[in-house]
Image (spheres, rainbow, N blue to C red):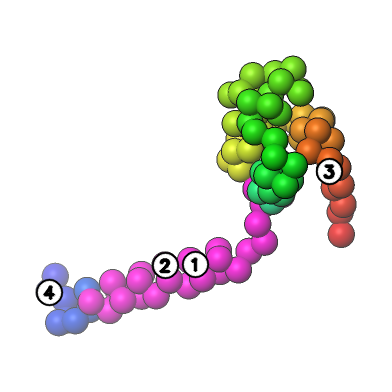
Amino acid sequence: MVQAPGSQRGRLGKRIKTRKAAEAIASMRPRPLKETVALQLAKAMGKKNISKAQLAGLLKTSRSQVDRLLDPTSDVTLSSLQRAAAQAGRRVVVQLI
């Protein structure tokens, strides 16, 4: 089957527009909870001058576990986040709105 000239370009243009629209929508989504908490915990550690190694010692855990706490893509328990936040002088509050 012979396609009309430009029909391939038309589909490509639609895919590009769709991808750009999806990227724009994704950028408008709220930040995931874990990512927000990890960033806030890192900032709180910085304000109190607590290093990752020091936090690991305070939590009686490994430095790699602290890395996981601060990694926005890793799964950690809420209680671990609460313990880490307490050491940085903060607390975790989760709210459904």
Q: Which three-letter amino acid code belongs to the residue tagged 3?
A: Arg
Instruction: Give whichever of discs 3 and 4 has the lower sequence position.
Output: 4
Marks 4 and 1, Cα distance to the nearest angstrom? 32 Å
Instruction: Quadrant for the C terminus, please.
Output: bottom right
Residue labelled with disc 1: 22
Which comes before the other along the chain, label 2 or label 4?
Answer: 4
Q: Are marks 3 and 2 in contact (CB under 8 Å)?
A: no
For mark 4, what is the residue? 2
Local packing at callout 3 (Cα closer than 10 Å; few below 14, some 14-19, many 20+) is: some
What amino acid type should be assigned to the residue bearing mark 4?
A: Val
Of the image marks 4 and 1, the number of the one nearer the N terminus: 4
Q: Residues within 10 Å of mark 1 (few under 14, many from 20)?
A: few
Residue designated by label 3 = 90
Which residue is found at the position 68% from the left and 44% from the top?
46
| Position of the N terminus by quadrant | bottom left
Disc 2 + disc 4, Cβ < 8 Å = no
Residue denoted by label 2: 19
Q: Mark 3 and mark 2: span between their CA atoms?
A: 39 Å
| Amino acid beneath label 1 | Ala
Q: Earlier in the sequence, mark 3 or mark 2?
A: 2
State the separation of the CA atoms marked 1 and 3: 36 Å
For residue 78, above or below residue 93? above
Q: Nearer the viewer, residue 58 or 6?
A: 58
What residue is drawn where x is 60% and y is 35%?
74
Q: Quadrant of residue 51?
A: top right
